[in-house]
Image (cartoon, helix red, strand yellow):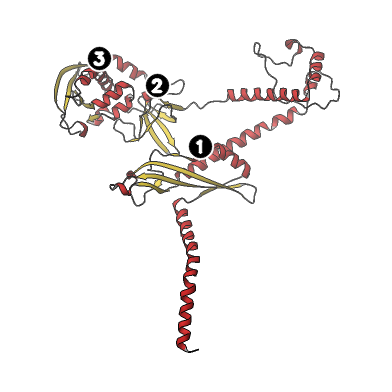
Amino acid sequence: MTRRSFRVATLSIRRRFLPAALRAVFPLVVLLVAEQSGYAQAGPYERTYRQSKSAVEKALKELQPSMSGRLPALEGFASSGDHPLNRYQRAYYQSAVQVSSTASGGSLVRVSTKVTAWYADSIPSRSGYQLLTSNGRIESDLLDQLTDLLATSSTAMSSSQSFPAASAKRPLTAEKGIENKGTKEPTISAPMPRLPETGRTFSSSADAGLSAQQLSDSKNSLRPTDRTATGLQAEAASLEEVLKNQAHPKNLVAIKKSGTPVVATPSLNGKTLFLASAHDEFEMLDFNADWVHVRISGLSRGWIWRTSLEMPEGISDIPQAGASANLVAADLFQVTREETAPFPGDWEPLRGKNVKIISVQKIQENEKDSGARAKLEFAKSLLDKNYAELAAKSQELAGVVLIFDSVDGGMIAATLPTVQQWKAGTLSDAALWHQCYFDPPETFNVAGPAGG
């Protein structure tokens, strides 16, 4: 074979087999790149526990509702990527958990989370749901919950193991003075039911009205299945009593109306984190005369207007100072002038529109109780009083403006739709103030010292 013919044969072999080899290797390369990119997007967070794998998996079933859901905001939960986080909406998370046994008999738990959100681009065709990178806050919070749950389960198990050992030493028949005839009846270690009218147990035959012989005859007449059912009923009654006596958390607050804002700082001008729905519950961390500090999730915190919440037992929804402010507000201020004019400010919802302007003055300039809370109470009464006129002139008036003419005065402005929603009951007082305009804002800042 000549050198030219050898070169032609080599090129022919390369053209025949090289595409096939590339087709075989290419999927492996793509899979490797996909695995590496997936791991970078949701890296696993792991923690070791001394409990067995089955015990950890049982505890994780109780935490299943915490493994997925909607995020109130992306800030603090996801890392910013190609786009700023404020361009995303409707954020959701989904956590995956893997449990494996360790050499010491414990368990290794790995948690990875996917965060998805709708990206709103200026070009609609580029909008869509995108996968974001979790910063580990959700994973750490889930592992913390698992640690607390396992610690509680271990404590409850260790305290309950002492009861069967103590009750197994003395059969029930021996405690009642009934002769044990050698029957192989199961020993019932569950507590005996209590008499509803006296609160005493059946341990005394005189109180129960049964003699030892009658109790023995009735017990011997029961079939094995009946005796088992009786024992199960006694255990069920005991468990119901335990659940009834369990302490319900006393530091939970509940939202009264949907649309209540949860804000970042205790101020009427604080940034709204999200709007809570009716009956949502939050853990109360602290409170003052006007605001309640709550835990949102993990390390996330927020503030909610106190009158928008159902407070725990023993704590009033409306503080005493606020209750008296509503009664005396009419005695502190008076309306001096009413007129229709263009909005005297630069607030976008009312800019250049006609509004009703109500001027208010203090009856006594040196009145000490005419602070921010009293102004807001009087403003509510004026909004309620003037709503009928505003609704009748909805074609002419876009809103209402209240001007407090005093050294520490200020201006409150509200649009007509906001007042309508508040009157209809779809907006709470807190939601009403968060949709109003305050100038200057610090004049109406009603945040007070912490209460405990």
Whether 187 is drawn above or below 91: the answer is above
User: In this figure, which residue is indicated by the disc labeled 2?
Assistant: 317
Whether 244 is drawn above or below 30: the answer is above
Q: For numbered disc 3, what is the local secondary structure?
A: helix
Q: Position of residue 314 (x, y in %)?
A: 45, 20
Is there a contact, CB below 8 Å, between mark 2 and mark 3? no
Residue type at numbered disc 1: Pro
- Most foreground residue, 104 or 1: 1
Residue at 17%, 23% (x, y): give it. 357
Pick whichever of labels 3 and 1 is earlier in the sequence: 1
Which marked residue is nearer to the observer: mark 2 or mark 1?
A: 1
Is 114 displayed left or right of 179 in the figure?
A: left
User: In this figure, which residue is indicated by the disc labeled 3?
Assistant: 330
Could you say which quadrant of the image residue 219 lies in?
Answer: top right
The Cα atoms of the two marked residues, 2 and 3, are separated by 22 Å
Q: Position of residue 163 (x, y in %)?
A: 70, 29
Residue type at numbered disc 3: Ala
Mark identifier at residue 65 = 1
- Most foreground residue, 353 or 150: 353
